[in-house]
Amino acid sequence: MTVLREHPTDEITRMPVRSRAFEWTAGILGVLAAAVGAWMYFVPSDWFLGGLAEGWYLGAFIGAGVLLAFAFGVAANRAFALDDGWSGEAVTWTVLSLLALAAAVVFTVIWIV
């Protein structure tokens, strides 16, 4: 039995490619949150929730930045794992993730100040 388990093979096995539904869902929710935030920016103050308009659009932008950073980070991790290192795709997804996270931090600071 040991001979069968230790039999050398020339076949290279890889992990199966996972579904990209997870990062697509987070990315689409992030884009929708950014769209809602952009719409809330232009809501008139006499709207029935107009007094909350500032908090709503900044909160939506912060949420969008966090969701997009998460989605881009998962895509960067996948590209890093599949390419066995820092490929152009992995670097691109990482830069996009860091930019989205930086945008979320900037909107958080704007909201606090």
Image (cartoon, rainbow, N blue to C red):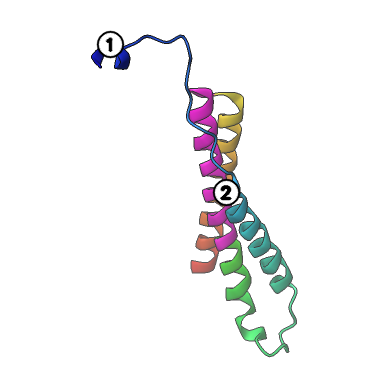
**Label 1 SS:** helix
First in sequence: mark 2 or mark 1?
1
Quarter of the figure with the N terminus? top left
- Which marked residue is nearer to the observer: mark 2 or mark 1? 1
Give above or below for 18 relative to 89.
below
- Tell me, for residue 23, which label it has, or none: 2
Could you tell me residue 54's position as x and y percent? 62, 75
Could you tell me residue 70's position as x and y percent? 52, 50
Mark 2, other Cα within 10 Å: few <14 / some 14–19 / many ≥20: some
Give above or below for 94 relative to 27.
above
**Label 2 SS:** helix
Q: Which residues are magenta?
A: 63-86
Residue 77 is inside the magenta segment: yes
Q: In this figure, which residue is indicated by the disc labeled 1?
A: 3
Q: Residue at x 63, y 70 (%)?
A: 57
Residue 113 visible in the picture: no
Q: Residue at x 64, y 78 (%)?
A: 53
